[in-house]
Every structure is written in structure tokens, then in C-alpha cells.
Image (cartoon, grey):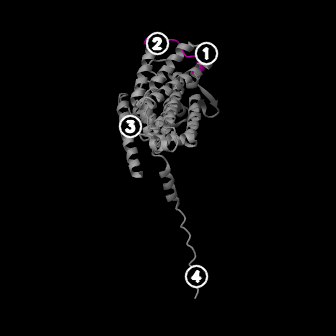
Amino acid sequence: MTVTAPPPTEAAPERPASRAWRLLRAVPPIWLVLVAVIVLIAWRNPTFVEPVPFLAFLRRCAPLAVLAAGQVFVIIAGEFDLSVGALVTAVVVVAARLSDGDPGNTWWLIPLLLAGGALVGLVNGLVTTRLRVPSFIATLGMLLVLNGAVFLWSGGAPRGSLADNFRQFGRFGVEVPGLGQLPYAVLVLVALGVGLWLLLSHTRFGHQVYAAGGNPRAAALSGVDVRRVRTAAFVISGLSAVVAGVLLGGFTGVTAEAGVGYEFQAIAAVVLGGAVLGGGRGSVGAALAGALTLQSVFTLLNLLGLAKSLRDAVQGLIIIGAAAYAAHRLRRSG
């Protein structure tokens, strides 16, 4: 007697609601938080989501977002960079002194500033990896060095001025019919964000950054030069700080306090984006979303009429809460 096997059963089609929930769970939580905060802002101020005000908001966010995109490399690699705020200030003050309002000086000045930012990152990396000084201490020392150098350079009051073609990156944009002026700062942010995302997520170097922060001993045994990778991460952070300084100088002008506090805001944005302090977890896209969310929260606080001094308290709570949540997710997935 021949036994006929039953026909294979077809898998039940996935319900649209289940598919939508699965896709929603795959979205990093910070993007959902960002949307929620923007909805609250739009509820208080409906004109916020109109093209012109919203693009102006993105222009204000660009310097911090650029800093966060560079800082995330350092944090994923298992280190910190506290010198970026002082480097932003140095960029603005030095650029004003060397430019002195002459448009002809801009095109050699920007490469010079980028070289200086790379040098600062290289020194941070070498001191951390070769001399084995904890990055928190090394970059804190660099912060003090840069602040002291800026004070000696400016005598406490910045001199000179930024040329118009230098400030255009932070002030002006491209006219788009029906949209208004698309700020150059937003274009720079998009280009830099895409470039750093590709570098971190789709290159061998990016995989090495994750390995160096996640398990440096295993990474070294597998052939990764952990010290070189971490030093390169500091260089990327330094270059990002220079770009942020150029954008911020164009937007706010010359001031000796241009970058004050930006180092902590950048770390807060990265942690808010889900990066784990200690290394191994994080992404450029989530760091950018963290920066936008942080600025959105500040905007909402202003709309609610709360004191500006609450920013520091809110920023500290965000760092603690986001770090605790990231650690909780890491324990559950580990």
C-alpha cells in the first residue's frame, strides 16, 4: 500500500498590520522621538513646518549635526573627544584673524583650517593610543590647550572679520523655486552625512571601527590595527569640528565662545542616537537624528517659555537616560 504524503502547506500571508509593526520596530527609536517632538513644536507653532522656517531650523542644526557625525566614530571606537568645542572656537577666531575680511584669503584658509583640525585629531589619537592616556583626559587637556591658545591669539577679544565668501556657507544658500533658499549648510550636512555613513557602514575601515570598540583584543588578534583605527577616528572628529566651525562662524559671526558646550551636546546627540558609551554600537544616521532631536527639544523648551538655563539640566538628563536605555537594550540583546 502506497502512502501519499500530504501536500505542503503554504505559509499564511503576512497581515499588513504585522508587516507595518515589523517595519516600525526596525526603525531606530530616535527617529520616532524626533517626529514626536516636531509634531509638538508644530502644535505650538504651526508655521514651524513650513519650508522657510523649517530650512532655517535645519541650518541652525547643521553645526551640531556635523560634530555628532564625527564624534560617533570616536565613541564607536571606544573613546571620547572633548576637544571639539574648543576646536570650533579656534576655527572661528583664527579664521577671522587670518581672513580679516579679505575674500581672497578664504580659499587657502579653509584647507589650512582642515589641516589644523586633522593635526589636532592626530595628536589626540597618538596621545591616547601610543602614550596610553585615557581619551577623556587627553582630549580634556587638548580643550584647555586650545582655549589657552585662542585667548593668547585674541587677547580675550577676537580681532578681524570673516569674509563674505567664508560666511556664505553658514548664511546663504541656493534659490529653489517654490521652496525658497536652500541653505548651503544643509547641503554640506547632507553631503558629509552621506559620505560618513558610507565610510562607517560600507567600508572595511568602518567594520574595523566597530571591531576596535566592541572587542579590541579580538580585533587585534584578527589583524585589525586598533591604535591606527582609533587615531583615524580622532582625525575624522577633528575634521568634522573644522567644518562645523566654518558653518557656525558663517551663521553667528566672530565670538570667543562660538563652540562653548558643543562637545557635550555632540556626545549627548550621539548617545541619544543609541550609541553605547564604551564602543561597538552606533551609527551616523542615528547620531544625526540625535542632533536634530536635541535641537528640537531646545526649540520646544523655548516655545514653552522655559528658562534657557534648563538646557544644561535637560541635556544631562538626556545623556543619563539615553545611556541607560542603550545599556538596557545591549543587555537584552547580549
Q: Main secondary structure of the magenta part?
A: loop
Residue found 62% across the figure and 19% down from its top:
107
Q: Position of residue 122 (x, y in %)?
A: 50, 27
How dense is the environment of label 4, judged by Cα within 10 Å: few (below 14), some, or many (20 and up)?
Answer: few
Amino acid at pointer 4: Thr
Q: Are marks 4 and 2 in contact (CB under 8 Å)?
A: no
Q: Which residue is mark 1?
A: 105
Amino acid at pointer 2: Ser
On the question of residue 299 being in view, the answer is no
Q: Which residues are magenta?
A: 154-166
Q: Which residue is mark 3?
A: 319
Disc 4 or 3, which lies upstream in sequence? 4
In the picture, which quadrant includes the N terminus? Answer: bottom right
Amino acid at pointer 1: Asn
Q: Are marks 3 and 1 in contact (CB under 8 Å)?
A: no
Disc 3 or 1, which lies upstream in sequence? 1
Disc 4 or 1, which lies upstream in sequence? 4
Q: Position of residue 59 (x, y in %)?
A: 53, 30
Q: Which residue is mark 4?
A: 4
SS at badge 4: loop
Disc 3 or 2, which lies upstream in sequence? 2
Please name whichever residue, 1 or 47, is drawn nearer the observer in this view of the structure: 1
Question: Which label number is shown at residue 316?
Answer: none
Residue found 41% across the figure and 21% down from its top:
144
